[in-house]
Structures are given as structure tokens and as C-alpha cells.
Image: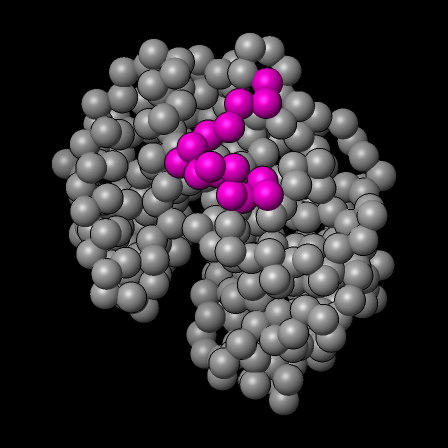
Amino acid sequence: MKVAVVGAGAIGAYVGAALQRAGADVHLLARGPHLAAMRQHGVKVHSPRGDWTAQVHATDRAEDIGPVDHVFLGLKANSYAACGPLVEPLLQEHTSVIAAQNGIPWWYFHRHGGPHDGKRIESVDPGGSVTAVLPQERAIGCVVYAATELEGPGVVRHIEGTRFSIGEPDRSVSKRCLEFSEAMQAGGLKCPVEPDLRNDIWIKLLGNISFNPISALTRATMREMCVHDSTRGVIELMMAETLSVASALGCHPEISIERRIAGAERVGDHRTSTLQDLEKGKPLELDVLLSAVVELAEFTDVKVPTLRTVAAISDLLAQGTAVAA
């Protein structure tokens, strides 16, 4: 099985290293000091489950890799529309694109069924720009429950969690999903094939939609947000509104708000990916996390006043970050 990881940051390099350990033919697309370190020393993983190193082919040229069976997309969702030059050389007729994306994916209503089937979400796929680069029929959804950080060039700090749930937009259990799942499990990761991944999307989104923007606004860690009573109250409101939108779209995640927050608190003093991006001066990935749900609330006629307020403030922060970048 030949796999290309486009965007081999903390999550991408971690997955690539695991797949290489399982015997897959893995190629990482990266750049800068991170690329140089992986070329020289491989991917070094520091983990509570034990440290290890994988010697993986790394390059900054997709043309050097050629067509693959699976593209694992480790880019931020706000980079998808511009990733064509990176992805196109990797595609052949049956290549899948496994998008390890937080928030609402561009393929959400592809083969969804019901009254919203085929609907495009503007905040996620503006003008169809993402679909033009990443055709929806190639998409396999992926919800990441692992927490990782780049400790340094070529060095991944695995904090906790090894689960990467995947699934087809049409809810089938496909051969391509099973193939990728088996390779991930052989590499030591959990990779269940979910009949309806949209439920997992909403479970993960409960945390991302609240903790990510609030952490960027306050510079707080997961634990700090959970133990601060007033902030915890805002998070509970945001989660409740998010569940109302999910319900209006026919999804009913089997998790309570209390359990979701307790799980986040156990992560400890981990900085969310949005806070890490802010500290590095990178664009903030808030459209798919927050703006998309506000948009979904509009056409399902669900009232989300807390989400709207946090979205407005976060958008101002994101604009400032974009100008600085």
C-alpha cells in the first residue's frame, strides 16, 4: 500500500511513521527545517507508550512521489483550496483522500440523503473551491482523537489518544476504508471504520467549537478552561447549541456535555491546535469549526446566540492574525 502524507506536521508525521512501521510505502510532503530533520533522522516519536523512530521518505515535491493508493491530508482545512499542486501528482483513478480535518468537512452533504443532499456549505467550501481541488467522491472522512505536538523539527510529541475514526460519506463500509484501517492498526493505532462518521464529527466538534476559539482568545490550556467556572459555563452553552444544530440535521451523538468536558480536562495543560497556530502567527482554522455551524444553524432555523457571539469575536482575532501573517 502506497501512502502520501500531504502536510506532515504533528498529526501527519505521526500517522506516516505508524504506517511505515506497519510496512506501508510511506512518503511525507513537508518543507523547511522539519523536512530536513526527517530526511536526516527520520520521524522521532516521543510518547507515553514508548519512544520510537521511523525512517520515512520525505520530500517537498509531490512529483517525486507519483500516484499513490491513499493521500492522508494533514493540512489545515483553510489550506485545502490551494493544495491542488501538492495533491494532483499523487492521484490515480482510485486514489482516496483521507482528510484528517477538524470541524465540518467540505464533503458533509455528499451522499448525505434527505433534503440537504448535495448542499454546499459556503464557509467550508467557498464558491466550490475545495471541491474543485478535492473531488468529493475521493473523500474518506477522518476524525482524529489523538493529541500531538511538534516538539522540534522531525520530533513529534504524542500526548494521548491513538484513535483515528474513518468512514465513507455514503455510510458504506468500503474496501478502501478497510485497507487503510488494517494498516493503521498494524502500526499501533486505532482506526475503526464507522458506518456513520458524521456522529463522530459532531462529538469531536463539541470540543473544537468551544475550546479552540476560547483558548485562542484567552491563551488558556484545556485544563484551565475546564476548571474556570465562568468559562466552563460558556463552553457548556456552546456545546448545547452545537448539539441542537446536529439534532436538526439528524445526528444525535451519544455523549453528554459533562462527559465531553471531563474528557477534555483529563488531557491536562495541552494547548489546542488553534492556540498553537496563534502563537506561531499562522492563520486560524475557525471557519470549519465555528462559522460553518453558525451557517448550518441559519438554514435549519436553530438559535445559537452564544456561538454567534464567540464567532464574531474570534473572527476579529482571525483577521488580525491573517494581516500579521
- Determine the residue positioned at 35% across, 45% down: 286
Residue 314, given in percent of the width and then of the height, sits at 23, 44
Residue 19 at x, y percent in the picture:
73, 62
44 displayed left or right of 317: right
Residue shown at 68% from the left, 48% from the top: 97
Q: In the shown orientation, is residue 148 left or right of residue 183? A: left
149 in relation to 238, above or below: below
The image quadrant that residue 273 belongs to is: bottom left
> Residue 63, how many percent across, how many down?
72, 71
Front residue of 225 and 110? 110
Is residue 277 at least partly visible in the picture? yes
Does 139 appear above or below 111?
below
Image position, residue 16 (x, y; %): 67, 65
Which residue is at the far bottom? Answer: 40
**Which residue occupies the extreme left position in the image?**
230
Give, as a single range, the part of the protein colored magenta.
Answer: 117-132
Is residue 154 shown above or below 141?
below
120 magenta-colored = yes
User: What residue do we see at 49% from left, 61% from top?
Assistant: 148
Please state if 45 lies on the left or on the right of 310 as rendered.
right
Q: Quadrant of the N terminus?
A: bottom right
